[in-house]
């Protein structure tokens, strides 16, 4: 990639005893960042990967589904952060102990999820309205585990209540090791534009590491975030869905060797899709609907992807879906499309 920011070398990030190199982080995403995708992202340059958010109460009760979310069954080449959510300090502390015992290298507290079923419990982004409660949670978790503790935040509940600086400073005093800032309010959900200026202000106000998150969809955007905010690391979420190679491209742009490589041919591309798909089907035993969605993510942005989606919805067998995807990709390759252009690599 050639651009005016190419000379930037982003140093590795250290959070406690954990080294994150390159300082590119896979964001937690429900239904997306399972252990298979975490492994693939790490293979392609993510320096830290994060679980789907896990209920502290579910972990405390040893519910199989919650325990499964925090376990890493496939090999992992990067540190693992386990994200937990809840509002009870004691339950959060117990949950943190459980994820630590299950191999997590860091524990992340969710204080940014805006989904109704989470905030109605007084958890996730709802905690932005209760900084004291959030600080109590951090204190309890910090005392309970030896691994680093981080918190994922948003700017505030809505545009009339942007309190990221107050909250982040309170958490630093409570003992948190780093914060990640999704530069939107809870009310915005994922709409509008992320306001990176608040990441810059948080970085200037804090002595702990600040991780930037929001609207990073290409290597250039990752570089721009670092330039504009001076953040210590970049967290990538939705743009990595169906595009783990984005981490390799961003790593190369920030002065690191591109792990896993960027696909040069449609065959290289298909190998990763098949690995992700087949592992989900055979090992994880994911639903047909999930497998279909997986292929839709990988096809996003490509020519004729709408026709592929229509065809995939006509199929009910996982093997047929993968065959359909492979044929579509072969036809697209014959038409000479540029993988790097479509996947912003």
Image: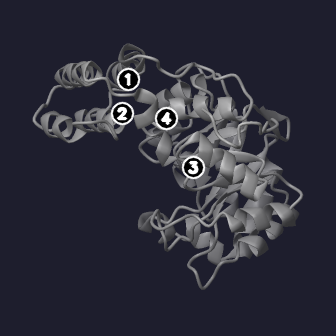
Q: Secondary structure at mark 2?
A: helix
Q: Earlier in the sequence, mark 4 or mark 2?
A: 4
- List the residue tagged with mark 2: 298
Q: Residue at x 76, y 63 (%)?
A: 200
* Mark 2 and mark 3 residues within 8 Å of each other at the beta carbon: no
Q: Nearer the viewer, residue 179 or 237?
A: 237
Q: CA distance from mark 1 to mark 3?
A: 22 Å
- List the residue tagged with mark 3: 216
Q: CA distance from mark 3 to mark 4?
A: 29 Å
Crowding at dot 2, Cα within 10 Å, few <14 / some 14-19 / many 20+, comes out as many
Q: Nearer the viewer, residue 14 or 330?
A: 330
Q: Secondary structure at mark 1?
A: helix
Crowding at dot 3, Cα within 10 Å, few <14 / some 14-19 / many 20+, comes out as many
Q: Quadrant of the N terminus?
A: top right
* Mark 2 and mark 1 residues within 8 Å of each other at the beta carbon: yes
Q: Residue at x 73, y 45 (%)?
A: 233
């Amino acid at each position: 990639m050639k651009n005016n920011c190419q000379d930037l070398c982003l140093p590795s990030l250290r959070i406690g005893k954990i080294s994150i190199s390159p300082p590119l982080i896979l964001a937690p995403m429900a239904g997306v960042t399972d252990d298979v995708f975490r492994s693939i992202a790490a293979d392609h340059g993510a320096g830290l990967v994060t679980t789907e958010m896990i209920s502290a109460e579910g972990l405390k009760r040893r519910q199989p589904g919650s325990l499964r979310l925090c376990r890493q069954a496939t090999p992992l080449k990067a540190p693992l952060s386990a994200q937990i959510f809840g509002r009870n300090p004691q339950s959060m502390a117990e949950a943190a102990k459980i994820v630590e015992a299950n191999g997590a290298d860091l524990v992340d507290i969710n204080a940014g999820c805006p989904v109704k079923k989470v905030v109605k419990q007084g958890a996730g982004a709802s905690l932005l309205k209760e900084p004291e409660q959030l600080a109590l949670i951090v204190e309890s978790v910090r005392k309970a585990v030896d691994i680093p503790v981080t918190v994922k935040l948003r700017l505030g509940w809505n545009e009339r209540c942007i309190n990221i600086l107050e909250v982040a400073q309170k958490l630093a005093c409570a003992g948190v090791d780093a914060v990640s800032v999704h530069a939107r309010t809870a009310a915005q959900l994922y709409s509008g534009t992320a306001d990176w200026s608040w990441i810059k202000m948080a970085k200037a106000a804090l002595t702990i590491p600040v991780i930037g998150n929001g609207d990073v969809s290409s290597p250039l955007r990752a570089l721009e975030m670092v330039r504009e905010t001076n953040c210590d690391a970049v967290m990538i979420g939705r743009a990595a869905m169906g595009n783990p190679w984005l981490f390799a491209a961003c790593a190369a742009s920030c002065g690191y060797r591109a792990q896993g490589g960027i696909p040069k041919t449609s065959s290289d591309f298909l190998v990763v899709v098949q690995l992700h798909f087949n592992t989900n089907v055979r090992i994880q035993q994911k639903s047909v609907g999930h497998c279909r969605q997986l292929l839709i993510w990988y096809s996003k942005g490509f020519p004729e992807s709408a026709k592929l989606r229509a065809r995939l919805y006509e199929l009910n067998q996982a093997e047929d879906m993968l065959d359909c995807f492979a044929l579509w990709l072969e036809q697209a390759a014959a038409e000479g499309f540029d993988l790097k252009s479509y996947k912003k690599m």
